């Protein structure tokens, strides 16, 4: 039988700003993204997981950060 479950690609987020590498995106907290402290999105720390493992939503990455990734 064909499995129709969707997977989700996620990346590690940390507030340990001293870990920053050239692959990380520094983001500031906002009501849109739900973060409480300045953080790093660790773009070299990716994982693909089953969407059923997601228990909640923190927030959304604002458009101006997404444009930096292109």
Image (cartoon, rainbow, N blue to C red):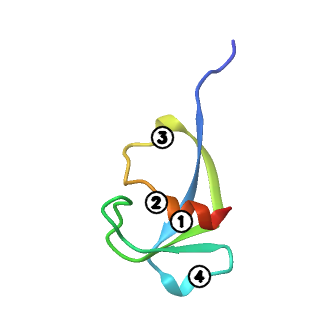
Residue bearing the label numbered 3: 53
Earlier along the polypeptide chain: callout 1 or callout 3?
Answer: 3
Label 4 CA crowd tier, 10 Å (few <14, some 14–19, many 20+): some
> Seen from this angle, which residue lies furthest top?
1
Q: What numbered label is drawn on residue 18?
A: none
What is the C-alpha distance between the residues marked 2 and 1?
6 Å
Q: Residues within 10 Å of mark 2 (few under 14, many from 20)?
A: few
Mark whose residue sits in front, 1 or 3: 1
Residues at marks 4 and 2, CA–CA distance in whole angstroms: 20 Å
Q: Residues within 10 Å of mark 1 (few under 14, many from 20)?
A: few
Q: CA distance from mark 2 to mark 3?
A: 24 Å
Say which of 15 and 29 sits in front.
29
Instruction: Compute the Cα span from label 1 to label 4.
Output: 16 Å
Query: Residue at 45% of width from left, 42% of height from top?
Result: 54
Q: Secondary structure at mark 4?
A: loop
Sequence-first tag of 2 and 3: 3
Residue 34 in the image, given as x and y percentages of width and height: 34, 60
Residue under pointer 2: 62
Numbered disc in front, either 2 or 3: 2
**Which residue is denoted by mark 1 in the rendering?**
65
User: Are circles 1 and 3 on residues that touch, CB within 8 Å?
Assistant: no
* SS category of the residue bearing label 2: loop
Q: Position of residue 16 (x, y in %)?
A: 47, 81
- Identify the residue at image location x=68%, y=61%: 70
């Amino acid at each position: 039988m064909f499995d129709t479950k969707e997977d989700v690609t996620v990346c590690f987020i940390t507030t340990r700003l001293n870990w920053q590498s050239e692959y990380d995106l520094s983001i500031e907290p906002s009501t849109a993204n739900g973060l409480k402290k300045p953080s790093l999105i660790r773009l070299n720390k990716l994982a693909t997981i089953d969407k059923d493992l997601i228990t909640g939503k923190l927030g959304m990455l604002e458009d101006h950060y997404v444009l930096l990734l292109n």
